[in-house]
Amino acid sequence: MKKLALVLALALAFALVPAHAEVDLSGMTLSELIELSQQVTMAMWETEEWEEVEVPIGVYEIGVDIPAKHWNIAAGDGHFPTITYASKLDASGRDAEWEDTIYEEWLMSSSYDYYEDYEGEYPESIDLDLSDGGYLIVEEGSVIFTPYTGKVDLGFK
């Protein structure tokens, strides 16, 4: 009975704490703050309300920076980016060797300045299944990530 009373008291106490209560981060180390930031980012990407996010030029680890799952990836507004999905990075940590490249593609936004000159040669978006431990390299412009909403691939060709 005491345990039930304690649980009810704790539940009531947490219910009375405002959702916008401030969290004191001043005692945390830089590595703790980075880890917390990554946890918050991953939690945001996993929420039901999340619809899309613009991912700028950079190198991203799947499962750390971007959740592992099936994504729709489109060229950012007015951009002509290239994406490389690789199993590992080269010695520079900014690129991948060709033998480690799983997928590479140029994407072209329909609002890109020279779209009419190249219309049909480059996709505006792709869908890609990203797995933990892989890397996504975004160059030449930003890309837009949205949850994949296409048909499930049943493996038929």
Image (cartoon, helix red, strand yellow):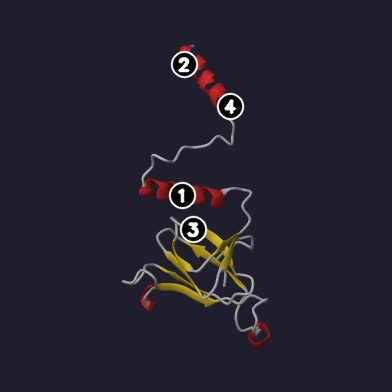
Q: Are marks 1 and 2 in contact (CB under 8 Å)?
A: no
- State the quadrant of the C terminus: bottom right
Report the residue that reaches farthest toward the left: 91
Q: Identify which residue, 27 or 118, lies in the foreground.
A: 27
Q: Earlier in the sequence, mark 1 or mark 2?
A: 2
Q: Nearer the viewer, residue 9 or 36?
A: 36
Mark 2 sits on what residue? 3
Please tell me in which quadrant of the rendered image residue 102 appears.
Answer: bottom left
- In terms of secondary structure, where does tag 1 sit? helix
Find numbered disc 3 in the image and state the secondary structure of the residue it sits on. Answer: loop
Measure how far apart labels 4 and 1 are at the Cα level.
Answer: 25 Å
Q: Residue furthest bottom?
A: 117
- Residue 37's tag is 1
Relative to 135, say whether 46 is above or below.
above
Q: Position of residue 124 (x, y in %)?
A: 62, 74
Residue located at (49% from left, 37% from top): 23
Residue under label 3, please give it: 66
Q: Which mark is residue 15?
A: 4
Q: Position of residue 113 (x, y in %)?
A: 65, 81
**Residue at horizontal 53 percent and vertical 36 percent from the top:** 22
